[in-house]
Each structure stands twice: as structure tokens, then as C-alpha cells.
Image (cartoon, coloured by chain):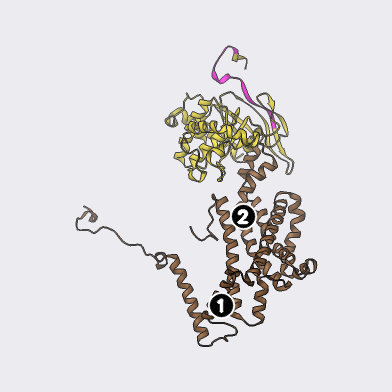
Chain colours: A brown, B yellow
Amino acid sequence: MSNLDNADQEDTVWTEAEGWGDRIPRAVQMLFVFVVFVLLWDLVTRFDLVSRLILPTPGETFNDLVFVGKNLITGGYMLVALWITLQEVFWGFILAIIIGFTLGVIVGETAFGERAIMPYLVAIDTMPKVAFAPLFVAWLGFGIESKVALAAFIATFPIIVGTAAGLHAADANSRMLFKTMGASRWQTLVKMKLPMGLPQIFTGLKIGSVGVMAGAITGEFLGGGKGFGELIRIAASQLNTPRVFSLILYLSILGLGLFAFVAWVQRRFVFWHKERISSGDH
Amino acid sequence: MQAAATNPAPTLREPVYELRNVGKTYARNLITALEGVSLTLTKGSFTAVIGSSGCGKSTLLKIMAGLIPPSTGRVALQGRPVMGPRRDIGMMFQQATLFPWRTTVENIVLPIEIRDGKAAAKLAQENARALLELVGLKGFEDVFPNELSGGMAQRASICRMLITEPAVLLLDEPFSALDELARDFMNMELQRICTTRDATAFLVTHSIPEAVLLADQVIVMAPRPGRIAEVVEIDLPRPRTLDMMTTPKFGALVEHIRSRLDKEAFL
């Protein structure tokens, strides 16, 4: 009789090691990081390790956050500025999507586009695009148009690259299948290549949505106007750092909203693709 | 051929697919992939092609599918020369290649949608549901392919191949990506489906037992240049069963084909 069959032997039951990170809810962990960050920030300002002019206390920043929030809600001058920036971002993104998608299809689908147009796009993409800002101001003036142009200019390239990469994502089997079905080039593009490339196209759109915000604000820094970027510039020139901080925070909410919107559209239309990189929840 | 009038044996039915002296030379590297291939697929027959890599069997299949033109010879399906992809050619690959944004039924009617438009595809859905029942996928009509197993996905791709009611089925190692148990089972299913629909089938495979199990004739191909080395008639009774694989006759056929392949592979 084997040792294992003895009645007085214990069952081989043991517990797998589990890190504490797996047990605590994600929200609690995120809150923990936030609290530690604010505490450190508070300590730095409390002991005057950094001048108040450079770094305001968390309390001051919070107060100003409430002040700006009130101004935005009651429709004050900051809401007017935010509305202008919002328009720049909106039109910039729309333009970038139209131009980026069209160029992406041309470059990704035609041999001519890939051979003759793509090299120029790559060359322009490697340039620091912000450097074009004065040019746009010179061409389009100090109004909203020059900001829209810069925002669109920055956001277009990731969309081109995403679309072109997406069109190349179709595997040999799918291409062969469509060939055997006698599909036209247009049918192959619309019914197979584009849907198959949607994950890459949306990656391009997400990167573009971040770029479009940067473009609009940079445009306002360099080309004046009446947008949110101008408010930040004025506050910074007055060394009103709490105001700079709170304006940036509200701006980042706007950017986050745009990004989340694109991600939401992606989840609706690309439900079949498992994406884990940027959504985080799996 | 003349015997057809006096002898009504099922092996002598009318020809569906005919190839005469077909050759293919790739201009790019002047390699003769295929030389002097002649074969006839009769209605309801099952033909398997076997050969080492580089024997030109995928070139042959592509020519038969109308995907590439031959350099020499004549190719005709149902009496009409094959000048490109046609709706009376059904094809199936190693990968099921179902599109994840379409439900099973929508994937199956895709060939109709491509050839006749969305309205015709809508009408063909009824037909697609009947086909899904034939292959044992009833209840999976409206799920997305990511919920199907490998074998189920291949069944769905059988339906997609059958939806246009092709005159010939070209099968390019259809089950080689499946595990062995699923593969045996799917081969039996394939036989059943082909018998039910009186289909003319042409199978490219790497497995000698699979070829012997399914085919009426096994075409052994040899490389450099790709050509037919021998056509082996398989006169095992139908329907074939997996038990037959253990009989001496089956073993002898497999052995014969293997010896032909071995000789060709190392020349």
C-alpha cells in the first residue's frame, strides 16, 4: 500500500502566492498614488523647498481650480475662451481626419502613392511641425484659422500612417479569398481591407486626437487669439502659477474627453478586435 | 471513354473539369513549375493530389482556380475555358478566413454579396442557414466567428464555398491546421457532404492516408519540373470509414504511394 493511501495523510492542499496588487481594487490603488503625490507636493511647498512663485501649494491650486470652474459654469470669459479652443480642436480634427484618411488610402492602396507620395510625407513628418506655426499665422492671420491649420497639420500624419498601415494589415489568405470570389478592387477595399485595418486606423485617430490638442494650444501660444492657450500664456506672464495649473487641468479634461470619445467609437465599431494597450481594462 | 455507353459505372460519368498538357513557367526566374499536366475530373468524383513541396501542386491549384494563367495547355470547366475566377469554382483554404465583423451567416453569403450585391445576399441567407444545418452548425448562424472552434470555422467555410453552388470544389489542405482527431472527423464529414451534393472535389494534401481515405484517384506529383508521376486508382468501397485505415489493402495503397513519393523526392 502506498503512503498516499494512509487515512491519516493530509490532502495536498496549498495556497498559491498572490501579490497584494491583485487583491486591492484598482480605484483604491490609483487613489493611493494620488494621495502620495499630493502629500509630497504639500511637503515641498510647506517647507519652502521651492519658491511659491514657481510652485503653488495644493490648497492654492485647489482654490483656483474652484474659481476657474465657477467661471466656466457661469459662462464667464473663460468659457468664451474654452469655446474658441474647442472650435479649433473640432475643426482641426475634422480636417485631419478627412485629409489623413484620404491620403492614407492613396498611399496605402496605390503603388504610385506608396512609391511617389509616401517619401514626401515621411520627410514632412520628420520635421518639427510646430516650426510651421509662424507660417500659418502669416498665411491665415491671427484668427482661429491659423490654429485650426496647425492643429490639423499635426494630427494628419498619425492618421495617414494608421490608415496606410491598416490597409496593409490584410493577410494573404483574405486577399486570395477575395480574388477567388472575383471581387473588384473597390469591393476588396471596402469589404475587406478597410474593416480589417480599423484597429490601426483608430490607433492613428487616437494619436491624432492628442496631437490636435497640442496643435491648437501651440497655435494660440504663438499666434495670439482669444483661446484657452492665450489665458495660460497671460497667467504665466503674470506669474499666476495656480491659474496656469488649473487651466492646464481643465484643458487636459478636454483632451481626455476627445481621446475617450475616439476610444468609445472604436469599441462600438471594432467590437471584434481585442485591444488591451490603451484601454487598460481587460 | 467509349465504354461509357455500354458500362454505366459511376466512375465513367461526364467530365466536369479538364486539363490538357498544362504547363507553367515563371518568367521571373525561368523556373518550370508545371509541365504537361493532363487530367479529367468526372462528375461526382473525388481526386486527391499529393507531392513533396515544389512539385507544383499549389501552382496547379491556382491555375484551376483561375487565379493565375497557365503558360501552355488548355483548361476548361464545364466545357468553358477558365480565364479567371468563376462562380462555379468553389475554393477552400487551410485557414477558414472568416471575417470577425460578420456573423457566420453573413460570412457565408459573402461570395453572393460580392457577385450579385447586398439584396441577393439577403435572399441567400435562407440557403446559408440550410447549408449550416447540413454541416452540423445549426444554432451558430448568428454568432460571430470568434465564438467558433477551429473545426466549426472550417465547417462554416465549407458553407461559404458551397453557397454559389460551384461545379467543382478545390480544397487546399483544408483541415491541416486542425488537430488529428478533429481532422479525421472533418474528413468523414467532407465525404458525407460531397456524397450528399454529388460534388466534384479536388483535394491538395500532404497526408497519404487522408488522400487514400477520401479519393477515387490519387495523383502523385513529382518535382523539377512539376509533373504527374502516377495516377493511383483507389477502389476501396464507399462510403469510406476510419476503420478501413487498418485494412491490408489500405496499407498497401499507402505504401505504394509512399514508395513513389520517396523515389521522386530525392532524385
Identify which residue is drawn at 72% across, 73% down.
A224
Residue located beneath label 2 in the image: A200
The stretch drawn in magenta includes residue B6: yes
The chain ID associated with circle 1 is A
Which element carries disc 2, helix, strand or loop? helix
Identify which residue is drawn at 74% across, 56% down.
A118
Quarter of the N terminus of chain B within the rendering: top right
Drawn side of residue A26 relative to residue B264, left or right: left
Which quarter of the picture shows residue B71?
A: top right
Kind of residue at disc 2: Gln
Residue stretch rendered in magenta on the structure: B5-22
Between marks 1 and 2 in the image, the one whose residue lies nearer the viewer: 1
In the image, is residue B150 above or below residue A28? above
Identify which residue is drawn at 66% across, 70% down.
A81
Q: Count neighbours of disc 1 (C-alpha within 10 A) and say few if under 14, some if 14 to 19, many if 20 or more.
A: some
In the image, is residue B92 above or below residue A128? above
Label pair 1/2, CB-CB below 8 angstroms: no
Q: Position of residue A182 (x, y in %)?
A: 67, 36
Drawn side of residue A69 relative to residue A126, left or right: left
The chain ID associated with circle 2 is A
Q: Position of residue B198 (x, y in %)?
A: 54, 24
Drawn side of residue A201 relative to residue A23, left or right: right
**Residue A33 versus residue A66: which sits nearer the camera?**
A66
Kind of residue at disc 1: Asp
Q: Position of residue B174 (x, y in %)?
A: 54, 38
Mark 1 or 2, nearer chain start: 1
The stretch drawn in magenta includes residue B174: no
Residue located beneath label 1 in the image: A64
Identify which residue is drawn at 48% across, 73% down.
A34
